[in-house]
Amino acid sequence: MHLTEPFGDRALTQPLVERMMSLAERLSPRQVRLMEVCGSHTMSFFRTGVRSLLPDNVTLLSGPGCPVCVTPNRELDQMIALASLPNVTVATFGDMLRVPGSRSSLVQARTSGADVRVVYSPMDALTFAEADPSREVVFLGVGFETTAPTVAATVLEAARRDLRNFSVLVAHKLVPPALRALLTSGEVRIDAFILPGHVSTIIGAQPYAFLESEFGIPSVIAGFLPTDLLEGVVGCLELVAYDQAEVRNRYARFVRERGNVAAKSVLEETFEPCDAEWRGFGVIPESGLRLRPHLRRFDALERFTLDLPEPREVHGCLCGEVLKGMVSPDECKLFGTACSPENPIGPCMVSSEGACAAHYKYGAHRAVKV
Amino acid sequence: MCLAVPGKVLEKDGMDVTVDFGGTRRRARADLTPDIVVGEYALVHAGFVIQKLDAAEAERTLEYLREMGEHAPD
């Protein structure tokens, strides 16, 4: 593992910390606002301690980078309704379980007798479907470009095996359109983006080119180990200091310029882009995926008729604003009082990589002034 | 949600691979990286290899980081 482990070495982080400090000093008194777009980055910045090393004039905002958090109540309600249907087994990644929809959650549905199973891989759902042909198995397809190809490959495998009792609720979201929506709204000032490492392993660097060409904003693709996180910050500060708006790839050991071509072709074969609703943003054009017509038989919403009331939002929950980097979690009146990881009200507190959960767990080291 | 962990490919049988994560072995699918071979490092997410490690790039990054340390002002 000599090529995968040293990226956490202190001997390698120290020079990066020094470089970060000298760049920040050079930029002072300017306040530099960086946004990390990925929930795994949010957590990693806290967990590794890198966040606590940030200079005073560098602010790190969390963006719309946690799939669980950006899933709107309408989709959550559909998931819970599907789980509550007779003869249906719902297979899901674990972080969806406790997310409250308008009126319930998957875990509450399970308590009421629904068959909700947590899986590690979408392929596990195929195993359930094959094991019991008398039951319908629905997989909850949540996640960004990192996860969508794994679900796409699973659907193609289901087609090869001609499975009749397997379907997917497709709630996948795409990162670049959300960044565009964020910048177009003009609600938040962002000097540079730290771009999601694992989304980028799939899509590559090219889809972010508009950040530079249309908005003049620099960005750095970064990984998740201490040196990676520091390289992300240092790269952003260098680009800001030299007034360059390029997309830099500092996770080249896993991210190729064109991404993962095989994964992109699996995605392309399975899904087509469609408009999608995001918590906090509303509908963002071409930011979601739907099954292509020849695979539509695997679409759970085509297979089951759901008659659902209009979704309801929790009064006072600021998750939507948190996801846009407009407010810091501790600016929400519910934060740490009515809403905590033990009793979460909003999705950003439920998901372990939600900004609210991360801030709660590690304590907000520096209040973000927005 | 986008968590992915690197491990070494020990076996490959069609689209099924066995990956070693520092002593823990897990099965994964290679549909998204069909050309991966035994001995390479795989980045695994949700039961699938989503990318393989570019060893030359990893070496390059480590070398750059080490050099940075050597040339850092005291």
Image (cartoon, rainbow, N blue to C red):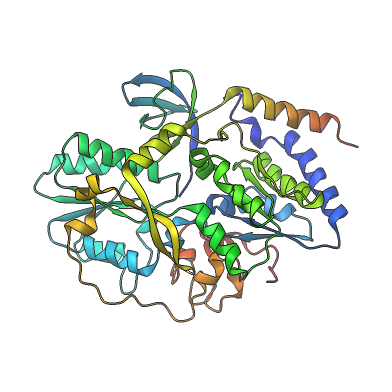
Left or right: A302 as drawn, with respect to A101:
left
Left or right: A114 as drawn, with respect to A193:
left
Q: Position of residue A149 (x, y in %)?
A: 38, 41
- Which residue reaches farthest front? A213
- Which residue reaches farthest right? B74
Towards the viewer: A24 or A201? A201
Towards the viewer: A141 or A53? A141
- Which residue reaches farthest left? A134
Towards the viewer: A202 or A233? A202
Q: Identify the image quadrant of the N terminus of chain A.
A: top right
| On screen, residue A128 above or below A331 | above
Left or right: A164 as drawn, with respect to A253:
left
Q: Is residue A250 visible?
A: yes
Residue at 43% from the left image edge and 19% from the top image edge: B37
Residue at 62% from the left image edge and 44% from the top image edge: A221
Q: Position of residue A175 (x, y in %)?
A: 50, 53
Q: Position of residue A325 (x, y in %)?
A: 60, 66
Q: Quadrant of residue A5?
A: top right
| On screen, residue A218 above or below A28 | above
Q: Is residue A353 visible?
A: no
| On screen, residue B11 above or below A99 | above
Q: How many marks?
A: 0
Residue at 77% from the left image edge and 41% from the top image edge: A16
Residue at 8% from the left image edge and 48% from the top image edge: A134
Q: Quadrant of residue A120?
A: top left
Q: Position of residue A225 (x, y in %)?
A: 62, 40
Q: Identify the image quadrant of the C terminus of chain A.
A: bottom right
